[in-house]
Amino acid sequence: MFNPDLRNTLKVFARKEFFNPDVLYAIIVTLGLVVPLAVGHYLNEPLLGGFAAVTGQNLLVIKFQHTYPQRALILIIGLLFITAAVLAGTLLGAYFGLAIIIMALIAGISSLLKEFGSFGQVIGFCAVIIFLLALPPPHSLDIGIDRYVAVWLGGLWAAFITLFFWFFLPDLPYYTSIARPWELSSNLAVFLASANVRKNYAERVQEKEINLRQAINDVLPYLRLHHVRYFFIRRDLLKVVRASSRFGVTIMAMNHALEHLREHPKKHLFMPAVQERLFLAAAGAKIIVNALVLARPQELDKLKEIIIQLKTSTEQLQILTDSNQKDFTIQVDLHRFITLLDSATHYLEDAHYLLTRIRQKKQLPTTQVAAQNKTRLLPPLRALFQFKNVPLKHTLRLMLVTSVGVALYLGFQIPRGYWIPLTVMVVLQPDFGTTQQKAMQRVLGTFLGGILGTLLIIHPFPPVIFILAITTFSFLFLYFQQRNYAVSVTFLTMMLVAMFEVSGPIDWHLAAYRLFATVLGVILSVTAAFLLWPDWERTKVRFVMARGLRANFNLLQQLHHELLSQTGFHARIIADRRKAEGANIEIAESVKRLQLEPGTKKQKQEIAQNLAFYNVRLSRELLSLAALLPQIKVDSPTYAETDTYLRQAADQLEEIMTALITEKNVAGNIPQDLPFPAYKFNLELKTGLVSTAKNINLHLDTEILQTEIVHEQLNKIADAIFNMNQLVFNLNQL
């Protein structure tokens, strides 16, 4: 009935949208906006419909990482705050001084709520919007109650969509979050297997690696739950997540060998076999996803079959490796791939064992669980005052500037003047560079959207056409929000023009009013970011870099400890990996802010960017070494060499960190020469000795191949450290 290719494409798209909603997310949020608008128009209450629509849309923007009970509590508390804002705006809007004070309080609370994460930021911003929309007259209690009810209805509509599956699939968020790392690891394996030399290949691999890391970080709040429902299986589920992390690292480590194999002139002899094994590993990961999300027992039998096929095919691949005895590069890279494939298969086996045990434990009674195992529904209130995400001085600056914006709006009776403080809330960031960038994008998007939106009101279309236009513009606004901010703001402005047309007759002046208010808000934001307690990135970037180096140093030390303890790829490595990757994200954001700041030397920007690159590379190479740790035994010839080099590398990183922080070149002379000979020359020497001594055909045994793979990995670590040392030296010379 359907074309098989089309069916497979739709299946892949649906699976992708389930685990990482993009188009579906835009559709759902658009529904939160359009349905209340349409109902309000039908009931001849377009303004009240607008309050419900804004509330519904904003609450659906939240990308929850919580169970259904937590989501429900967050929405209820959020709605209490938002409805308080609408009452305050309606009843106090006529009082100039009180309106300014309340605006400052709501803006300050909104900034503090960011400490709770994305849901706090969205709820706070929604409260600001609703308060500003409620400021215009009338200011009667009846109107306030009507708006209060409208906001509650919009919030309940958003809650209905958000919690729709609660009664049917109460564990869906829990198991979906745990399954997501396996899904992304599977997608990464498929990409590596099917990829030839493509445009932006390295960037796409890095993007997939970042998504995988984020998925593992997102699952941690679920694993901290002590709910009776998960008490017996929580530890096993944690081990399943650890297995997914190790599986993902192992798949990433295969990338280097695959790059070499794809470039080989005889790749047609072995690449089909390599791709087949990667597809098998990806299929195994997807079966684990199905077993977690769908809880189908038959999936475990399928996983067992995949594991058996992988073990059999690995033996066949080893035979293929031996058949290429005279090509050193093929042998080394194929052996690297086989070694990592063995590890990946082992992690699939771990997951199979754990899922089988989880299935058995689910059948046990849970009535004997201790009463103290309660679920924390919300983070502790002290998180509000830790200022990890937003500096205190930024919160105070935001309160002051939004108050000035409201004072200008009410004092001069500027039409649509609520866009002044609203623009400040969006544009004003903790640092000057990001504020300046957002300001330019905001003005450009508003200008283009205003021109295009004005074209909508030249002809008197019926309200149905405007509602369809709102639906289209809302979808495009959300779709481009993470892709192109200026384009996103353009569609936002067009959406607002259409919304106001539905609410009542307007003219072309609307776009001009909004552009004027937006420009005024931008001027206030940029001026405040420059004059009020400015936060310059160039004064902090060295310390951010040093923290990133320290995180890699700790990861290296942990690898050394696991090597000496012979514990292999231990969970402690995963914990340090998370910290190193988090530090790398901080460095990348710091470098981006540095590049946006005026007055920073271009040479310094380039050095900072290269330092960030090599620090990420060092993290990646250390994790690739972690994937090889299970193969480095005490009796292995590489054990002592790895031990010695890791001690040396730790000392070198300490010297680089000291030079970076003190701005003095105290680092020793780190040699440019790699610690181990180039593997091809070394292999030729060793195999020549073997063939001469034994008078047999040229052949490389597994031990020699394993030695050269470890040497090559240590050389990559040494190269990254050497380059970082040179960059810090050049930075201190400026």
Image: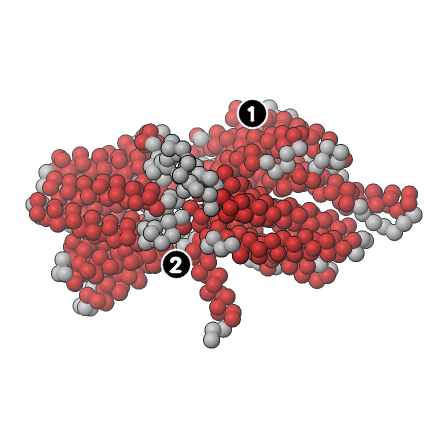
Is residue 164 left or right of 673 when viewed as pictured? left
Q: Residue at position x 77%, y 50% from top?
A: 328
At which x and y percent is residue 499? 22, 58
At which x and y percent is residue 239? 53, 41
Q: Residue at position x 19%, y 60% from top?
A: 39
Marks 1 & 2, CB-CB < 8 Å contact:
no
Q: Nearer the viewer, residue 319 or 403?
A: 319
Q: Which residue is mark 2?
A: 23
From this view, report whether residue 115 is shown above or below residue 318: above
Q: Nearer the viewer, residue 76 or 533?
A: 76
3D distance between C-alphas at marks 1 and 2: 47 Å
* Amino acid type at mark 2: Val
From this view, report whether residue 553 is shown above or below residue 422: above
Q: Which residue is mark 1?
A: 658
At which x and y percent is residue 174? 42, 46
* Amino acid type at mark 1: Thr
Disc 2 element: helix
